Image (tube, rainbow, N blue to C red):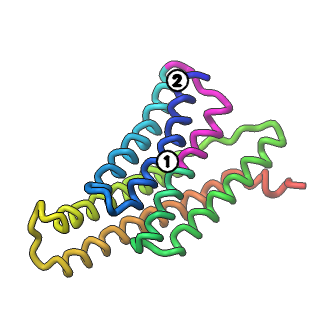
Amino acid sequence: MNLPNKLTVLRIILVPFYIFFLLMPGIQHHYLIALAIFGIASYTDHLDGKIARKYNMITDFGKFADPLADKIMILAALACFIQLGLTNAVVITVVVSREFMVTAIRLVASAKGKVVAANNWGKAKTISQIAAVLLVMLLQYVLELNSMNIIKLQNVADLTNAFNIIGEAAIWISVLFTVISGVIYMVQNFEFIKNAK
């Protein structure tokens, strides 16, 4: 297994760790720890692709595993956000539906001996999702600092409301990118849908 593929596998391995810290409010600075782990995992997404392209280490495994690792990473974070009351089930339903549709197209293409890699819209979707998750955790960490009396915020109730609205808006922007990228992906690969048997 080459280095980019190892980084992709590492991204998947990191998922349970940020889930643990994200859902453990009894641990001080749990949002910061989860944010740091998620940030490291996200950076491996950038790094594995960069190394693979620069040193011509692109593999079929990487083409499949890299987007799969992204899906696991993002869906785990969104599922945690639902449990924490930071978003709702509609968000994850849209994201999962898009991912199932793209995966189905990839499986049909694979059966025909073709590997369909991620396109630029898919990458934009992933970046918007990562940015939204990081922003939500950062805003919640600010509120956590206030609850720990490390900082003193004025009008905490209003600020909490505002932070939740900002976080939710960022998530919905990523959902918009998710839908657009899914539609474009379907149109670009319609031959596999049309000729599916």
Q: Taking 125 as reference, is 54 above or below it?
A: above
As rendered, which of 143 and 135 lies closer to the eye? 143
Q: Is residue 150 left or right of residue 194?
A: left
**The one of 100 and 69 positioned closer to us in this rendering:** 69
Magenta-highlighted stretch: main secondary structure?
helix
Q: Amino acid at mark 2?
A: Leu
Look at mark 2 in the image and give the residue it sits on. Answer: 3
Residue nearest the viewer, comparing 122 with 165? 165
Who's the residue at 11% across and 70% down the image? 153
Disc 1 element: helix
Q: Residue 196 at x, y = what percent?
A: 85, 54
Q: Mark 1 highlights which residue?
A: 15
* Left or right placement of residue 15 versus residue 59 in this view: left
Q: Is residue 188 left or right of residue 153?
A: right
The residue type indicated by label 1 comes to Val
Which segment did they paint magenta?
A: 55-70
> Would you place residue 195 above or below residue 37 in this image?
below
